[in-house]
Amino acid sequence: MKARLVLLALVALALPQRAHAQSCTATKFLGFFWFGCNINTTATMTVGTVMQLTLSGTTTTLTPPTVAGYTAGFMADNGPTATVRCNQAWHLQIASAATTWTATNTVAGITARPNKPSTDLQWSLAANGTFAGLTTTAVTVTNGTATAGTATNFFYHTLYGYAVDTPGKYTLAVVYTLISP
């Protein structure tokens, strides 16, 4: 009897094991109609945060000051348009990369102002709106919910003073940042 049990156990181990997947077999009823069968499966996925910030341009050439600009204290320019695409709530921020402009070039023996503050570039969301000077601290300028494309127009005022803004080339990196809270 023991030998027979051992033999059956060995045969059972040698037989191929059936996979534990779902299966279904259709059968005929009365030889004519097939009964179908269904197997349910599950599809899973994880959706991450999708954020895109596009600027209409990466360089804004500011209008050089004129007598009228020096007299008014500023020159007005259109800044870039920032377009946000995001699948959740978002904030758009602006800041300067440095506390001062980079000044280069000497014109007729006069050196460009080396300490022109970043706050001399002011931004607003309206051409005739309230303007604020850029600092290295990011400021949230607008926010929104999930969007397939929200555009924000920026406007600049560059401040000038006869006594301090000498001839030369001035460059300031402006940092636009899209964050998700």
Image (tube, rainbow, N blue to C red):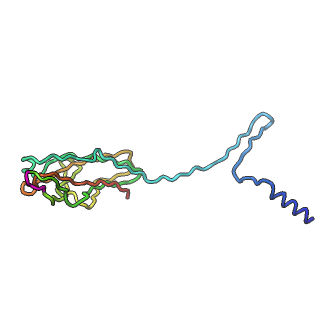
Task: Give the residue at the far bottom of this rendering.
Answer: 2
Residue at position x 70%, y 43% in the image: 37
Q: Which residues make up the magenta segment?
A: 108-112
120 relative to 16 in the view: left or right: left
172 relative to 83 in the view: left or right: left
Task: Give the residue at the far top of this rendering.
Answer: 32
21 relative to 132 in the view: left or right: right
The answer to whether residue 151 is above or below residue 97 is: above
Residue at position x 48%, y 52% in the image: 47
Residue 169 image position (x, y, % from top left): 16, 51
Q: Main secondary structure of the magenta part?
A: loop
Residue 161 image position (x, y, % from top left): 9, 55
Residue 147 image position (x, y, % from top left): 38, 47
The answer to whether residue 110 is magenta is yes
Residue 104 image position (x, y, % from top left): 17, 54
Closer to the camera in the image, 160 or 114: 114
Task: Give the residue at the far right of this rendering.
Answer: 1
The answer to whether residue 114 is above or below residue 30 is: below
Closer to the camera in the image, 13 or 32: 13
114 relative to 179 in the view: left or right: left
Question: Could you tell me how many numbered marks the image carries?
Answer: 0
Quadrant of res 134: bottom left
Residue at position x 25%, y 54% in the image: 174
Closer to the camera in the image, 44 or 159: 159
Quadrant of res 3: bottom right
The answer to whether residue 27 is magenta is no
Q: Quadrant of the N terminus?
A: bottom right
Q: Quadrant of the C terminus?
A: bottom left
The answer to whether residue 137 is above or below residue 126 is: below
